[in-house]
Image (cartoon, rainbow, N blue to C red):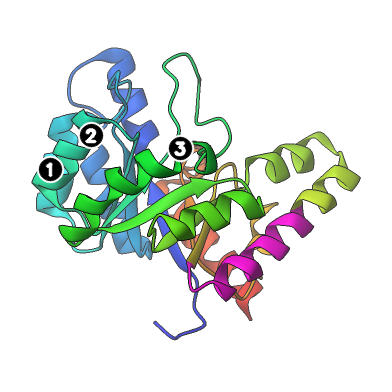
Amino acid sequence: MTDNQLRLGVNIDHVATVRNARGGAYPDPVRAAKLAEDAGADGITAHLREDRRHITDSDIDALMEALSVPLNFEMAATVEMQKIALRHKPHAVCIVPEKREERTTEGGLEVAREENRLAHFIAPLRDAGCRVSIFIAADRKQIDAAHRIGAEVIELHTGAYCDYHAEGRFEDRDRELEALREMSAYAHSLGLEVHAGHGLTYDSVQPVAAFPEVRELNIGHFLIGEAIFRGLTPAVQEMRRLMDAARG
């Protein structure tokens, strides 16, 4: 991989969602992770939620055993999740907000309001060798707080941009895209590594992929949905192609 190449992390949560809808062991998210890896994914993302609605503890065990690429372990800032992360010591830990009633992650983490607690929460993870990422909105106040608490990486929430794009609200979309652009550059100027993700599709990925400061995109729901129609390998390969084309 060249210095300019953008990494693709594939989130396999919703393979587990389909499995859990019926019970049993099929489809296997670990098999999906290996297919994504073979198709060009640079990493695998999995979110172990408090209610275990998709990924389970045994999935994390199996992913840690099976993967050759890094695992990005998404989790809430709870004692339970911290213990699991410290037991496994994945390559990366991404701290995300989590509410039991939400369908998917809504917005970014409120770092500025919980700065002291989060600083103490991530310190053992960093000491264990995990790269700590904070999932936040494109907001200078949150970026400054993430930097102060010692995070090495931020992941900018692209959900609003993608929603505006899908709804045809192009002025709002362009305003959100500009905020993402400005805050990517600002975070990079502080020495933070910049990632982005949430809601990205073939139609919306390229403007974000073109930001030179962004080093990684994490994409899941769309790719798992697209895999129904074209298969997971070609779905991942097409996303990889679009990202590379945007990067030039």
Q: Position of residue 190 (x, y in %)?
A: 54, 71
* Element assignment for label 3: helix
Q: Which residue does the image show at 45% across and 58% down from the upper left?
A: 148
Q: Would you say 74 lies left or right of 102 here?
A: left
Give the amino acid type for the residue marked by disc 2 in the picture: Met
Left or right of 228, for residue 22 = left
Counting residues from the start of the chain, the first of labels 1 and 2 encountered is 1
Q: Which residue is mark 3?
A: 114
Q: Classify mark 1: residues with Cα within 10 Å, few (<14), some (14-19) or many (20+).
A: few
- Residue under numbered circle 2: 81
| Residue ID at (29%, 49%) | 122
Q: Which residue is mark 1?
A: 62
Q: Relative to 138, is 183 above or below?
A: below
State which tag comes first along the sequence, 1 or 3.
1
Please tell me whether residue 214 belongs to the stretch shown in magenta: no
Whole-angstrom CA distance, mark 1 to mark 2, is 17 Å
- Residue bounds of the magenta highlight: 177-192
**Quarter-of-image position of residue 178:** bottom right
Say which quadrant the C terminus sits in: bottom right
Give the CA distance from mark 1 to mark 3: 33 Å
Q: Amino acid at mark 3?
A: Glu
Secondary structure state at the residue bearing disc 1? helix
Amino acid at dot 1: Ala
For the residues bearing labels 2 and 3, Cβ distance under 8 angstroms = no
